[in-house]
């Protein structure tokens, strides 16, 4: 690579793994503004038509782009569809054109502007990501309604450097062949990171002022593993990264095509299961050789309204999952609220501390009973394979209540002579510190624990899992989280019930090592993490993981945990 200028580094956060070396393409989309323009009465119809057409084009564009993408990206697009189809937005744009005689581009600009302002004024951090989404959506709709919708063409293999990017633009640029993404804004849980992971391109987010400090044509290295961007790298630096990149590619291939057994070098057998939400993920579950589904998220059944959550639709969904997988399938009851879908769309000041998971289900008995009946019915056909998992439990009373409802549904089925698995296991998510702290009391009431480290981390460290500004504080390997996990494992062992982990921690190399070191053998994770975790666990001894776990329990920071891991496994 030919070099020019002085080498410098921009530190950001690791959004998606991998290394890319190439030329930067800087897209500096400054804040858009559209001046108010009046139209004549005769033009009103055509401007309304242009708006309707822009919406239709946008929805088509999303539909087309979502076809080959994974569930995380499709979910993001699904949310965008909802915004564009919002009647409030529709009414306002049409009113501005019809009554106020504003041009379509200004009507769209003004309408979105009002919603954006409302979000901004709320001061809520949760809405920051929504503001960016709305701005991106607004710009795309304006372009499409002005028949100016053609995407900028950028050279293949470019490293795209942006302030921020909409999901559709990112997928479009990916299709043009970009090799990596660097973004000024965003955190590791931002849409850009999630999509970059799905597309398997390296990405660095929160790369402060990257747009300002980089120019199109600059040589750039993106290290999506450490979250750094090197601009104008020296020849030695480039050579170093090229070598590392070749090693990583080789390693990835070997892991994916290898036939490693799920056993450590000293004979500890473990099971790697998949976290699944959509039937479209089942191919990946097979490809990555998951041993069953450790967490079946069911919230998607609620997206489609009443029909999709009806008993028949639920049974069809569970049955497809069970038919196409082997091993256990742990079905989690609807976990609405917080960052997930809210069935009543009501506003809450603190949705993460609000009407979530089991709190909603115990208030909406019919939804709970229908789901339990559907799961029980399918369990009759797949005896021993179906487990029920209850989300967001915080108090023992809640599980006692769920058991009452479950028994009543079982009795009804018996009366109707409908088969079900009499020994179906009932477990709870450990995602709130109160459950870990009282794990031995909970253990007496249930058949298993499943630790949800995504929420356990946010509730233990008081860090919103979706807030980009404080994402560096969201550390799922923090020793405080480990103490709670350890306490849960201890209680499970004393009460002779199994404990699994289904949060992202299980798909993290350090996380999986410590979990196995604590004696946990059931880890459930995003399917794409399975090969790398299997490779790491099966090439080391449980004894080494046990030593690591001991050190971790004596650590005082996530940095120290990382250092202990490095010292033992030199990665
Ligand atoms: C968790 O909280 O760790 C978990 C697995 O559930 P979700 O990410 O769906 O909240
Ligand atoms: Mg959770």
Image (cartoon, grey):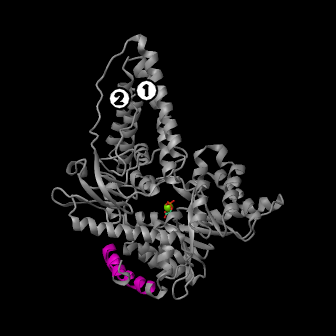
Q: Residue at x 38, y 17 (%)?
A: 101
SS of the residue at dot 1?
A: helix
Queried on whether the Cβ of the residue with tag 2 lies below 8 angstroms from ligand 1, the answer reads: no
Label 2: how many Cα within 10 Å (few below 14, some 14–19, many 20+): many
Magenta-highlighted stretch: main secondary structure?
helix
Numbered range of the magenta stretch: 545-566
Q: Residue at x 28, y 31 (%)?
A: 33
Quadrant of the rendering where the N terminus is positioned: bottom left
* Image location (x, y in percent) of residue 67: 55, 46
* Image location (x, y in percent) of residue 127: 38, 46
Q: CA distance from mark 2 to mark 1?
A: 9 Å
Instruction: Classify residue 398 by image quadrant.
Output: bottom right
SS of the residue at dot 2?
A: helix
Q: Residue tagged by mark 2?
A: 110
Using residue 402 as the reference point, say whether residue 133 is left or right of it. Answer: left
Label 1: how many Cα within 10 Å (few below 14, some 14–19, many 20+): some
Q: Check if residue 258 falls in the magenta segment.
A: no
Using residue 296 as the reference point, say whether residue 106 is left or right of it. Answer: left
Q: Residue tagged by mark 1?
A: 92
Who comes first in sequence, dot 2 or dot 1? 1
Residue 89 visible in the picture: yes
Using residue 305 as the reference point, say whether residue 211 is left or right of it. Answer: left
């Amino acid at each position: 690579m030919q070099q020019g200028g002085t080498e410098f580094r921009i530190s950001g956060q690791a959004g998606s793994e991998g290394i890319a070396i190439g030329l930067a393409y800087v897209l500096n989309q400054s804040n858009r503004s559209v001046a108010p323009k009046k139209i004549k009465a005769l033009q009103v119809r055509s401007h309304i038509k242009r708006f309707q057409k822009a919406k239709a084009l946008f929805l088509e564009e999303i539909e087309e782009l979502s076809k080959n993408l994974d569930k995380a990206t499709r979910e993001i697009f699904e949310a965008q569809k909802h915004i564009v189809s919002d009647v409030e937005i529709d009414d306002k744009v049409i009113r501005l054109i019809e009554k106020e005689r504003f041009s379509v581009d200004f009507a769209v600009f003004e309408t979105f502007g009002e919603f954006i302002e409302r979000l901004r004024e709320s001061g809520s951090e949760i809405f920051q990501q929504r503001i960016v989404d709305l701005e991106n959506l607004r710009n795309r709709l304006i372009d499409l309604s002005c028949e100016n919708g053609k995407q900028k063409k950028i050279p293949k293999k470019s490293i795209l450097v942006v302030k921020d990017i909409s999901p559709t633009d990112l997928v479009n640029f990916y299709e043009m062949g970009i090799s990596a993404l660097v973004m000024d804004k965003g955190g590791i849980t931002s849409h850009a990171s999630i999509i970059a992971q799905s597309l398997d391109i390296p990405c660095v987010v929160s790369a402060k002022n990257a747009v300002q400090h980089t120019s199109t044509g600059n040589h750039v290295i993106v290290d999506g593993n450490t979250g750094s961007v090197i601009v104008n790298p020296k020849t030695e630096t480039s050579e170093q990264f090229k070598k590392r990149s070749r090693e990583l590619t080789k390693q990835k291939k070997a892991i994916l095509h290898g036939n490693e057994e799920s056993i450590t070098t000293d004979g500890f057998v473990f099971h790697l299961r998949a976290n699944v939400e959509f039937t479209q993920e089942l191919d990946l579950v097979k490809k990555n050789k998951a041993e069953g589904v450790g967490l079946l998220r069911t919230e998607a059944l609620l997206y489609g309204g009443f029909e999709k959550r009806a008993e028949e639709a639920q049974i069809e969904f569970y049955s497809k999952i069970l038919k196409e997988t082997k091993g256990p399938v742990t079905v989690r009851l609807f976990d609405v609220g917080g960052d997930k879908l809210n069935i009543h769309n009501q506003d809450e000041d603190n949705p993460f501390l609000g009407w979530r998971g089991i709190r909603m289900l115990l208030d909406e008995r019919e939804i709970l009973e229908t789901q339990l009946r559907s799961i029980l019915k399918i369990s009759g056909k797949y005896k021993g394979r179906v487990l029920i998992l209850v989300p967001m439990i915080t108090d023992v009373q809640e599980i006692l209540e769920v058991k009452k409802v479950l028994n009543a549904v079982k009795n009804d089925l018996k009366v109707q002579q409908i088969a079900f698995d009499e020994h179906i296991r009932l477990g709870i998510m450990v995602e709130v510190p109160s459950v870990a702290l009282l794990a031995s009391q909970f253990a007496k009431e249930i058949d298993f624990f499943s630790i949800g480290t995504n929420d356990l981390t946010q509730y233990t460290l008081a860090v919103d899992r979706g807030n980009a500004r404080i994402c560096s504080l969201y550390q799922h390997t923090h020793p405080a989280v480990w103490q709670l996990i350890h306490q849960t494992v201890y209680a499970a062992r004393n009460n002779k019930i199994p404990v699994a982990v289904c949060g992202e921690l299980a798909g993290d190399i350090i996380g999986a090592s410590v979990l196995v070191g604590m004696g946990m053998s059931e880890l459930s994770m995003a399917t794409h993490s399975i090969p790398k975790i299997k490779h790491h666990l099966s090439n080391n001894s449980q004894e080494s993981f046990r030593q690591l776990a001991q050190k971790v329990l004596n650590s005082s920071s996530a940095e120290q945990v990382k250092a202990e891991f490095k010292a033992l496994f030199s990665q």
